[in-house]
Amino acid sequence: HLKNPNYFNMDGSRQGSKHFVTMWDIRGVNFTDNTFENTVEYEIVSNCIASTYSWDDDSRGTGIGTFDAQFNLNSTSPSTGQRNRFINLTRGIEARVTNSNLVYNFSTDGSQFSNVKYGIFTEHSNGDFIEDNDFVLLDPNGSGGPETPRSYGVYLHNYRNLDVQLNTFTGTANIYSEEWGLVSQQLSGNSSGIVSRNDFTKLSRGFQPQLNNTALEVKCNEFSNNQLDWHVNPLTLGNFSNQGVGCGLNDYRPGNLFLDLNQNHIRSQQVIGQNGPT
């Protein structure tokens, strides 16, 4: 159980929590049933009276931060709590690949991200496997934008192939909050992926494919009580792959389920080949 790493400046003042684990240029690291948690509080004394504060959500540290690393998160029994857990952090996992020609990826199966501002962020990864994880997002501070959400479960930036299945993404249902479930943006036209059987609930945006996602299958996902279920290319012009090919019994139909009545389920604004926003 890795808990509350404290870092100090040279003058002795607290700098906040940083990374629990940092890795670079490494392969084959396995994490099983670990907890990455931050419950640090600090005191400010004024007129001999001490007041206790918690760190703001941008100063709570990162569970695992990597550059050019291949690693796996495994869970013994998620249903009984034997799983990797990320609690009260700014970032759960931040995995970057420094050169798009390098092949690194990671997998997480059965992990829990609770009250984490940014659950998983990857950049230039090839073949990330994210399955059966739970993301409970916090109500974030600060400001964001259409393509830079203030809080999210998973953000796959410039991905090269992905597999995101059987996860749950849950927000706070605050209409003034900015909580995104899954954000995806591919690196090149040769990238592909599948987003399947995930549940998105009480979020500002459930699923946001942006820029280009030309070979991404999105099927059998469930959306409920979100402000907007899909937001396709909210800002930057790009391509998004067609989902489904007709209505025949033998045709591929994606089977996504939108549960809310009278909702704007899908909004697309900057899709190449589309006849205006819908």
Image: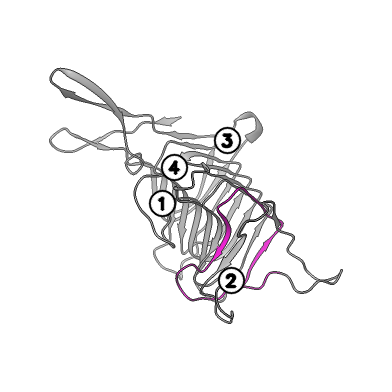
The reply, left or right, for residue 265 in relation to residue 181 is right
- Above or below, 226 against 44 in this view is below
Region in magenta: 214-243
Q: Main secondary structure of the magenta part?
A: loop
Q: Return the residue found at the far front.
A: 262
Which of disc 2 and disc 1 is earlier in sequence? 1
Q: CA distance from mark 3 to mark 4?
A: 24 Å
The residue to which callout 2 is attached is: 278
Q: Amino acid at mark 3?
A: Arg
Image spot of residue 253 (x, y percent): 77, 66
Element under label 4? loop
Q: CA distance from mark 3 to mark 1?
A: 26 Å
Q: CA distance from mark 4 to mark 1?
A: 9 Å
Image spot of residue 205 (x, y percent): 53, 55
The residue to which callout 3 is attached is: 83
Q: Amino acid at mark 4?
A: Asp
The residue to which callout 1 is attached is: 150
Which of disc 1 and disc 4 is earlier in sequence? 4
Element under label 2? loop
Q: Are marks 3 and 4 in contact (CB under 8 Å)?
A: no
Q: Are marks 3 and 2 in contact (CB under 8 Å)?
A: no
Q: Are marks 4 and 1 in contact (CB under 8 Å)?
A: no
Q: Are marks 1 and 2 in contact (CB under 8 Å)?
A: no
Which of disc 2 and disc 3 is earlier in sequence? 3
Q: Is residue 79 visible?
A: yes
